[in-house]
Image (cartoon, rainbow, N blue to C red):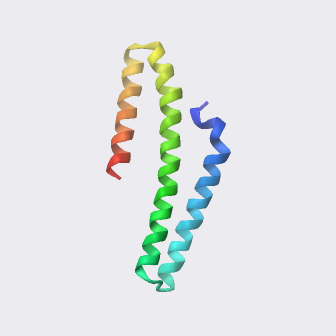
Amino acid sequence: MPGYISQKEDLLKRLRRAEGQVRGIHRMIEEDTYCIDVLTQVSAATKALETVALALLDDHLTHCVAEASAQGGEIAEEKMREASAAIARLVRS
């Protein structure tokens, strides 16, 4: 089971909210809404997705990485590489 299973409903709720925000942005562009208003909504949608990403990362670290660390060896090293790569992707985005 993934580490986020206990937060699944909250994550799905946040994703539905972000999905609605993106649809709203699409509609705003279609309706030629003022640039700053569109950018404000893009910022809100980005924040919503970042919140989901950080929750997933936290769960990965406290569940998957912690379990692998307890086992040690190559499994632990692989999970640490995965976590580092995921953090790097989040920082670059």
x and y percentages locating residue 45 in the rendered image: 50, 62
Left or right: residue 69 compared with residue 12: left
Depicted 47 relative to depicted 31: above or below: above
- Report the label total: 0
Depicted 59 relative to depicted 15: above or below: above
x and y percentages locating residue 10 in the rendered image: 65, 47
x and y percentages locating residue 25 in the rendered image: 51, 73
Tell me the residue at 64%/42% (across/down). Answer: 8
x and y percentages locating residue 51 in the rendered image: 51, 49
- Which quadrant is home to the N terminus? top right
Left or right: residue 14 compared with residue 29: right
Tell me the residue at 42%/19% (across/down). Answer: 75
Tell me the residue at 58%/55% (across/down). Answer: 15
Tell me the residue at 35%/45% (across/down). Answer: 89
Outermost residue, bottom direction? 32
